[in-house]
Image: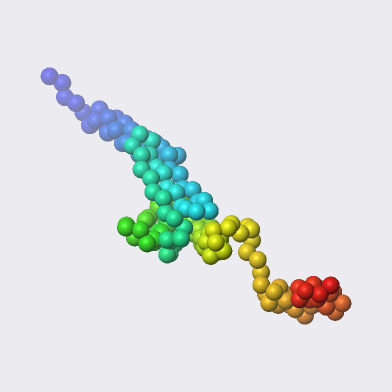
Amino acid sequence: MSLIGINDWSGWIASAIAAAVVLLIAGGVTRWMTTHHVITNERLIYRAGFIAKQGKEIPLEVINDVAFSQTVFERIFNTGDLLIESAGTHGQSRYRDIPHPEEVQSLVYSVREKRKMAMESGGVPTSSAPAESVASQLEKLSRLHDSGKLSDAEFESEKAKLLGGN
């Protein structure tokens, strides 16, 4: 009958801890690599899974709010969570470990506004940049003129073009 000393168990314990850490990291990397978030001009699409799969699609017109959050650790790695509130049956959807969550939030709002404009114009897609009103263009011209970046002649010429003259 032999006695197993503490030193014999410490090797097994260290090996078990190392194996657990490797499995946790491998699981996280696999989950990250098999999760896809896609924003189209019509919807937000979420797909996840390697063996078992899951997915969700949210039409842009039913999105009410998009919020992001980042812990200090997530800010270091520039990831975070998005919380999307929609008029769907589940109301809120939380998406974790999104790269650049603040930029994604802005992108969702931008694409949503373009979609809204397209729907209001009868479903005809608008150009990538929404058309500025004549008033806002005149305001910009005025600021350029006031700051000295446009001469009086240039200002009058551009103003005439905007107002339908030559």
Judged left or right of residue 126, residue 36 is left
Spot occupied by residue 98 in the image (x, y as percentages of width and height): 46, 51
Who is closer to the viewer here, 12 or 65? 65
Residue 156 percent coordinates (x, y):
83, 78
Q: Residue furthest left?
A: 1
Indicate left or right for 135 with 42 as reference. right
The N terminus - image quarter: top left
Determine the residue positioned at 55% across, 61% down: 122
Q: Which quarter of the rendering shows the C terminus?
A: bottom right
Name the residue nearer the viewer: 111 or 21. 111
Is residue 137 visible to us here?
yes
Q: Where residue 133 appears, x then y in whole percent?
A: 66, 72
Figure quadrant of residue 123: bottom right
- Residue at the image position 58 percent from the left and 58 percent from the top: 124
Question: Measuring 32% from the left and 58% from the top, which residue is drawn there?
Answer: 89
Q: Is residue 28 above or below residue 83?
A: above
Q: Residue at x 42, y 54 (%)?
A: 58
Q: Is residue 77 left or right of residue 140?
A: left
